[in-house]
Image (cartoon, grey):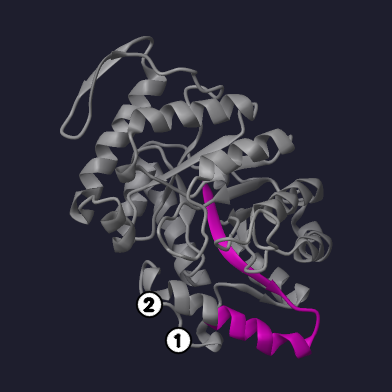
Amino acid sequence: MRFGLFGGARTKRGAGPDDSHGYAGFIDYVIEAEKLGYDSVFLVEHHFTGQGQISASMTLLAYLAAKTRTIRLGTAVVVLPWHNPVLVAEQAATLDVLSGGRLELGVGKGYRAGEFAGFCVPMEEAGERFDEAIEVIRKAWTSPGRFSHHGKRWTYDDIVVEPEPLQRPHPPLWMAAGSPDSIRRAAREGYNLLLDQLGSVAITIDRVALFREECRRAGRAFDSSMVAAARALQMIRDESEREAAIATRRRVVGVIGDLARGGEAPRDAAEDDAPLLGTAAEIRARLERLRAGGIERVLLVDPNASIEGLRAFAHDVMPAFADTSAAAD
């Protein structure tokens, strides 16, 4: 199995860059993750929350590109309805060049009404805006020279996007999806699949199976590296820490539970098998279930962004899965 990171820095207004949950601490966290053998970091994009979430993911990834050498740099996701697609293509290609071809570009339609309201973009237009934006981005990266585009939202005449991305024909494209229709679309249209952290083990396995089957129907070769599942990480050393870990999980689910796809979030900890919560042995067992269901790539969401937690997982969990190669079908 392969393990990466999911989420990003959090800041507090007026706290400055040295806040323990701010950018400086998060940069150290990613640098340490690379040293420990984690293979990727995927950053969210959110706006206007008051929670200090990352708003400019590619800017932070560009800085991380200069501070790291091997870790893959992903967006999860750039919400295309809010952005000029040519600028996204230019910025992403620049990041790919600067990082030596390490960009993984996750894109999405967005789902938070408050963010659409803040940008004065009608939420009901998200789908059509996304479709046109990704068409422009693909055209920008694959056209042999200058191109034009005349669409409903965007018009460009005789332009060329520079630089070209280092990865050819372009960096891997990821789509965050949970509903059957969106999973099928991701498979048909050549996206890799990002799965959320709230889906149960059974739901997550079912989604991978659906993606695999739709790839087959579309004549697309499936590889386990094309799917990544986010999982909350809360490792405990003994039973004295379990209650606090469960309380943290309840708080997190309370904040994001209404954003869960594919059904309501679990109502209590006993029903909630999505997080990697427990001792190292319990976490290894849960990962074995995911691996048996075809999931070889896991993105860890640590609510504390703890370097100590990174080290503990790398020491006590990762070696048990180190000899597993990505399976192709």
Is residue 329 among what the camera can see? Answer: no
Circle 1 residue: 267
Amino acid at the residue labelled 1: Arg
Magenta-highlighted residues: 227-250
Asked if disc 2 and disc 1 are in contact, CB closer than 8 Å, the reply is yes
Image vertical order of residue 263 relative to residue 157, above or below: below
Look at 60% across and 85% down and name the residue there: 247
x and y percent of residue 172 in the render? Answer: 50, 35
Question: 10 Å neighbourhood of mark 1: few (<14), some, or many (≥20)?
Answer: few
Image vertical order of residue 221 relative to residue 254, above or below: above
Look at 46% across and 79% down and name the residue there: 254
Image vertical order of residue 198 relative to residue 193, above or below: below
Left or right: 109 in relation to 164: left
The tag on residue 58 is none
x and y percent of residue 131 in the render? Answer: 26, 39
Circle 2 residue: 264
Amino acid at the residue labelled 2: Glu
The answer to which quarter of the image holds residue 151 is top left
Left or right: 10 in relation to 199: right
x and y percent of residue 84 in the render? Answer: 33, 34
Image vertical order of residue 69 relative to residue 47, above or below: above
The Cα atoms of the two marked residues, 2 and 1, are separated by 8 Å
Q: Secondary structure at mark 1?
A: loop
Q: Secondary structure at mark 2?
A: loop
Question: 10 Å neighbourhood of mark 2: few (<14), some, or many (≥20)?
Answer: few
x and y percent of residue 296 in the render? Answer: 61, 53
- Give 187 or 5, whichever is nearer the viewer: 5
Residue 235 covered by magenta stretch: yes
